[in-house]
Image (tube, rainbow, N blue to C red):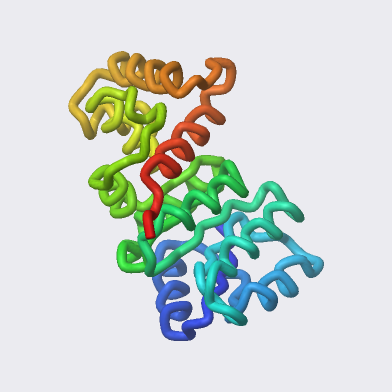
Amino acid sequence: MRIAIADDSTLFRSGLVLLLEASGAQVAVQASSGAELIARLFRSGPRPDAVILDLRMPPTFTGEGIAVATEIRARDPGIGILVLSTFAEASYASQLMDALGYGVGYLLKDTVTDAGHLVSQLERIVAGETILDPTIVRRLLQRKRSASTIESLNPREREVLARMAEGRSNVGIAQDLHLSPRTVEAHVTSVFGKLGLEQTDTDNNRIRAVLAFLRSAGDRR
């Protein structure tokens, strides 16, 4: 797997490169800002399979990672994008997934410690899945929600939706909750129905359901 990385912290970027290359991935491009990454990314030559972006980079150190991710996706829809952040904020994750829709992940830097797991997450993102850091999911579950259709879900359906937000498949959800795959499938179908999602596109419905979850329990500042 070919990977490009943009992070203004030389120390973190170097550590990430070592972590990835130890698992057999090839880090093809490194940059300290989004602008530098884009300038190097779209030169002639093979494109990376995935891009890892810091959320906050020069020049303003706000949400550059989301803006850069959006531009990369517009220029090459096939590149998977993982945004890393020190901030467990649902609003950023919601913006990112709303803008990209598929093949995207939002993880906390503190959780990126296992090389094999990171590569596995990147492979899933490249395959088109969406992944949200479990820490954010847990915090969202603990927050009070505004009145919304999410309130119509029963506790088990919310557990299933939370694991969908983490990017788990139906089989993964079944294993985690000690349910049969058929039972999980029934819960997923019920979640889609209660959220008013058509049954014609299961993959997109999973993304829409995750976005509904993020918006219903987003940051309240």
Q: Residue at x 36, y 44 (%)?
A: 217
The residue nearer to you, when weighing 141 against 15, is 141
Locate the N terminus by quadrant: bottom right
Relative vertical location of residue 175 with respect to residue 131 in this rendering, above or below: above
Is 154 placed left or right of 188 in the picture? left
Locate the C terminus by quadrant: bottom left
Q: Give the image quarter of residue 34.
A: bottom right
Q: Residue at x 44, y 16 (%)?
A: 193
Q: Residue at x 50, y 67 (%)?
A: 55
| Residue 59 position in % (x across, y down) | 61, 81
| Residue 125 position in % (x across, y down) | 51, 47
The residue nearer to you, when weighing 32 against 162, is 162
| Residue 134 position in % (x across, y down) | 31, 50
Relative vertical location of residue 151 with respect to residue 45 in this rendering, above or below: above
Is 160 placed left or right of 74 in the picture? left
Q: Residue at x 21, y 30 (%)?
A: 177
| Residue 212 position in % (x across, y down) | 46, 36
Q: Residue furthest bottom?
A: 10
Q: Give the image quarter of residue 180.
A: top left
Relative vertical location of residue 42 with respect to residue 101 in this rendering, above or below: below
Q: Residue furthest left?
A: 178
The residue nearer to you, when weighing 171 against 26, is 171
Please count the marks in the image: 0
